[in-house]
Image: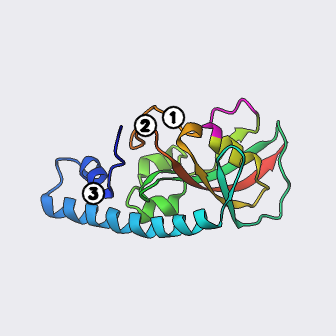
Amino acid sequence: FFKQKTAYEIGVRLVGSEMCIRDRKEVIKKMDSLAKIDLIKLDEYNKKSIKQKSGVKIYVIKQGKGIKPKDGNVVKLYADGYLTNGVLFWSNNIDINERHGKYDVDKEARGFYDPIEMELSPDMQLIPGFKEAVYTMNVGDIIYCFIPYHLAYGSESRGLILPNSDLSFIIHMVTAEN
């Protein structure tokens, strides 16, 4: 059984060995502080969320005024992924990356911070819980979703995501087109 790593433990791994100790401590301190702030926000959303039959929990942060996309529509999304301890493990939102000190000019040049574009389909290459959450959305919606481990990566490990990890996401559906 694997224990969820703290922001400090993750920070030690992320900041690298070439950084001086004082700078490394500052980066870790910032990560810990941001994780605590994000965890408070995520906990609030989780308490307000509605549990689906599958175990996925969804809370609409902002109701969009757009259409509900159908299979075959191309949707564009921003998404921020968090571990249960509030540590950000992935985001294509430039503001979130800058706030967390994870902005990368090379990623921006490659379009990493653009919305994710995908055709809405049962065959989308997404974890099942994320796919389920996307299917509940209208264009313009911003939602929180909690994804239990069995609808995330299950017993597999992915970077900062340990086996059997529950995940949380903030997802914003920007557009949907035929």
| Mark 3 to mark 2 CA distance (whole Å) | 19 Å
- Left or right: 128, with 6 as reference point: right
Residue for badge 1: 154
> Residue placed at 51% from the left, 58% from the top?
94
Considering only vertical position in the picture, is 112 above or below 41?
A: above
- Residue type (three-letter) at the residue carrying disc 2: Pro
Q: Secondary structure at mark 3?
A: helix
Question: Which secondary structure dominates the residues rendered in magenta?
Answer: loop
Considering only vertical position in the picture, is 45 above or below 83?
A: below
Whether pointer 2 and pointer 1 mark residues with C-beta atoms closer than 8 Å, the reply is yes
Which one is earlier in the sequence, the residue at label 3 or at label 2? 3
Q: Position of residue 37 (x, y in %)?
A: 43, 70
Which mark is nearer the camera, 1 or 3? 1
| Mark 2 to mark 1 CA distance (whole Å) | 6 Å
> Residue placed at 60% from the left, 37% from the top?
127
Residue for badge 3: 8
- Left or right: 143, with 175 as reference point: left
Magenta stretch in the rendered image: 122-128
Question: Is residue 29 within the magenta segment?
Answer: no
Q: Secondary structure at mark 2?
A: loop
Of residues 155 and 38, the one drawn nearer to the viewer in this rendering = 155
Quarter where residue 178 is shown: top right
Mark number, residue 163: 2
> Residue placed at 70% from the left, 39% from the top?
118
Whether pointer 3 and pointer 2 mark residues with C-beta atoms closer than 8 Å, the reply is no
